[in-house]
Amino acid sequence: MEYNKSPISLREGKIFIDGVECADGVKCDIKFTPTVWSGTQLGERTPSSRWLGYAITGSITRRRSNNWLREKIKEYKASGATPELTIQGIMDDTNSDYYRDFGTDTVTAVGCVLTGDLPLTALDSAGEIVDDVIGFNAKDIM
């Protein structure tokens, strides 16, 4: 394109959990949050800042179409071992400027552990569609 910009469309992508495409996925975000130290010394007017570590967190929003989450809970209850997952987000909007310049944007989070409330059932007299929001922490990203 010569005149128009083509930013990435967030609609163009895929989510994978342990290598299986999450076909009912609606949203995925994976975030890197640095742990920041800030401090001053005598005579300084502004603090210095430094990264001391980080947290990798995220969430997946999906339309419930299988019992995947219930199976993970059942596995944990039977073994007592924390389930670790690999979660991958792929942005592949082939018509975007980003894709033209850099190709597919893939983030793979490893050592993912589910956090927060894990929805088992949801009923509503208004008859809405069930979207499960599942939070996670990750050990690392690739």
Image (tube, helix red, strand yellow):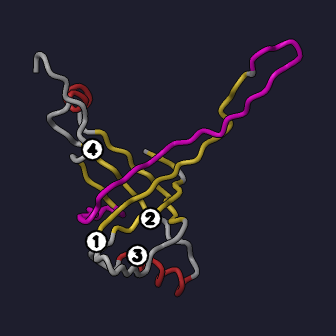
Q: Please, what secondary structure does the residue beneath circle 4 have? A: loop
Can you say whether 14 is above or below 39 in the image?
Answer: below
The residue that appears at 31% across and 76% down in the rendered structure is 126
Residue 36 disc label = none
Q: Please determine whether, in this image, residue 47 is positioned above or below residue 33.
A: above
Relative to 45, say whether 23 is above or below.
below
Contact flag, marks 2 and 3 (Cβ < 8 Å) = yes
Marked residue nearer the N-terminal end (1 or 3): 3
Q: Which residues are magenta?
A: 17-46
Question: Residue 129 shows which numbered tag?
Answer: 1
Label 3 – label 4 distance at C-alpha:
25 Å
Disc number lying in front (1 or 2): 1
Report the Cα–Cα distance between label 1 and label 3: 17 Å
Quarter of the figure with residue 121? bottom left
Residue under numbered circle 2: 134
The residues tagged by marks 2 and 3 sit, at their Cα atoms, a distance apart of: 9 Å
In front: label 3 or label 4? 4
Q: Position of residue 105 (x, y in %)?
A: 30, 39
User: Callout 4, which amino acid?
Assistant: Leu
Left or right: residue 138 versus residue 86 is right
**Of the residues shown, which amino acid type is indicated by label 3?**
Leu
